[in-house]
Image: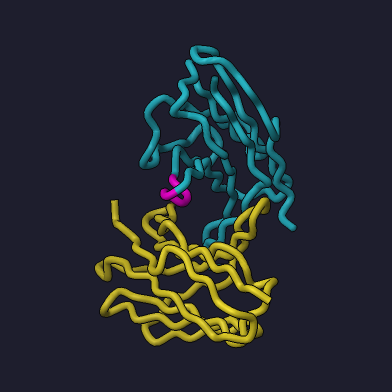
Chain colours: A cyan, B yellow
Amino acid sequence: DAGITQSPRHKVTETGTPVTLRCHQTENHRYMYWYRQDPGHGLRLIHYSYGVKDTDKGEVSDGYSVSRSKTEDFLLTLESATSSQTSVYFCAISEPGRVRDVQYFGPGTRLTVT
Amino acid sequence: ILNVEQSPQSLHVQEGDSTNFTCSFPSSNFYALHWYRWETAKSPEALFVMTLNGDEKKKGRISATLNTKEGYSYLYIKGSQPEDSATYLCARYNTDKLIFGTGTRLQVFP
């Protein structure tokens, strides 16, 4: 299994509070991704990173920001959580050109915003 | 956004039945198509990555085909087993990203 951990694994927070989710990898992969999983929508990309300090938006980036100051860590921040951000969040990593860009997923973080 | 469509949304089959699902995607500027298997309470895991028109991949009882000209891929499961129960996702590679379909949820009953 690819060495990917996510923390916390579960979190309940109140509307309006800031929340940061962490993804940590030990594989030295260059690309890292944050997805959210919602019923009927599958996996939707929030943001991704193609290197330290290099990030770009995905299809559902509003209300989220990311940072990557080290290869191994990719942080997802909800500046002011809303109930619509209740979801399961998955981090993934990949290395361009290796195994045809297969993505390896972390265990997920279940976030509930009350 | 390049829409990736999967059908059916869900499928219930008996143990021993063979089944197949479809993934359709825009065929222009095609690079690769991925299939992932996602068991409940686990994380998605890669099954196949396919790049060439006419590609066929096989892993045990599961196989996949690819038609890049018409923009579709089929996933086949031969002799379904209860442990095949999962959501099967396809994803089209597009400039550093994967665009996922919403998946086909398969349930295999003993």
Q: List x then y, in percent, for residue B13.
A: 55, 77
Relative placement, left or right, of A22 versus A62 is right
Q: In the depicted view, which residue is nearer to us: A104 or A67?
A: A104
**Number of numbered labels in the structure image:** 0
Q: List x then y, in percent, for residue B19.
A: 51, 82
In reply to whether residue A112 is colored magenta, the answer given is no
Q: Would you place residue B88 above or below residue A104 in this image? A: below
Q: Residue at x 55, y 62 (%)?
A: B87
Relative placement, left or right, of A24 versus A79 is right
Q: Can residue A98 be seen in this view?
A: no
- Quadrant placement of the C terminus of chain B: bottom right
> Which residue is at the far top?
A16
In reply to whether residue A41 is colored magenta, the answer given is yes
Q: Can residue A78 be seen in this view?
A: yes
Q: Residue at x 42, y 56 (%)?
A: B102
Quarter of image, res B108: bottom right
Q: Give the range drawn in magenta.
A: A40-44
Q: List x then y, in percent, for residue B54.
A: 39, 87
Q: Which residue is drawn at 44% across and 28% down?
A: A84
Relative placement, left or right, of B4 versus B65 is left
